[in-house]
Image (cartoon, rainbow, N blue to C red):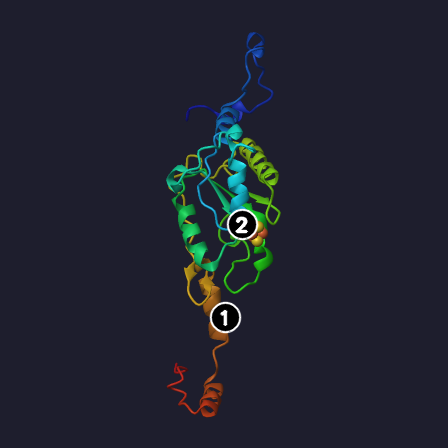
Amino acid sequence: MNDLNLKELHNPDIPVPEEMQSNVAITSLSSLYNWSRAHSVWPMLFGLACCAIEMIATAASRYDLARFGMEVMRASPRQADLMIVSGTVTKKMVVPIVRLYNQMPEPKYVLAMGACASGGGPFKEGYNVVSGIDKYLPVDVYVPGCPPTPQALLYGIISLHKKIEKQNLAVSASVPWYGAGPNEAVPVPVLGPDIIDPRHAELFRREAMKNRPTPLVAEAVAEATGQSAEAGGHKE
Ligand code: SF4
């Protein structure tokens, strides 16, 4: 496969011999590869909140995910290539979600189902909820709604199929995982008094230093509270 020039396979100027034209249904390796991937996506089996009920309904007989080759929901991230984030992402839950994402093999996709997963929903800016999973993971498809109906989720899944089918093995920007070594893990957020994304740690440190009270202010605070400035924890 490596010896093939994939760009040539996609060249529409290369004529298909006449005797083959009536038989050739698939015109390139990329199309074959993407067609098979798109129609055998295995979602990871987990749900977060009310949206998960609609996801379960989508997998049941009435809406029948099996039509899309997706009936095999996997209980292990090692065997899944689609993460459907179905529900409210709390600050406590985002840590295992990112860990699970890192354990999925490439190529992998993320579908944010519903208002909560897409942007925090009714709980946006709540003390315990993150404002969308896309702050931490790359999201491929957003499905709006609170909750989205099974039909809306199916539309999102079909949109994902289209996205997969458009990926071109000859263009590395569209398939950064193809032929690459082990992929880089997404930094796992740190749960403390507030959730911290390690990618922004330096920014937080700078802001914290900026807002640190000057010795003069520290003394005034200590005087007002009746503690020594040193005991108040403002010592350099
Ligand atoms: S978007 Fe609505 S239905 Fe879905 S998890 Fe949030 S509150 Fe529940």
Judge whether 28 appears above or below 143 on screen.
above
Q: Is residue 109 left or right of residue 124?
A: left
Residue closest to the eye, 16 or 55: 55
**Residue at image point 58% right, 9% down:** 18
**Residue at image point 50% right, 70% down:** 207
Residue 139 visible somewhere in the drawing: no
Q: Position of residue 56 (x, y in %)?
A: 51, 40
Q: Position of residue 41 (x, y in %)?
A: 48, 33
Residue closest to the eye, 228 or 205: 228
Q: Earlier in the sequence, mark 2 or mark 1?
A: 2
Q: Position of residue 145 (x, y in %)?
A: 62, 47
Label 2 C-beta lies within 8 Å of the nearest ligand 1 atom: yes
What is the number of callouts on the image? 2
Toward which corner of the image does residue 201 lie, by quadrant? bottom left
Quadrant containing the C terminus is: bottom left
Q: Secondary structure at mark 1?
A: helix
Numbered circle sitting on residue 207: 1
Q: Secondary structure at mark 2?
A: helix
Numbered circle sitting on residue 50: 2
Mark 2 or 1, which is nearer the eye? Answer: 2
The amino acid beneath tag 1 is: Glu
Q: Position of residue 198 (x, y in %)?
A: 43, 59
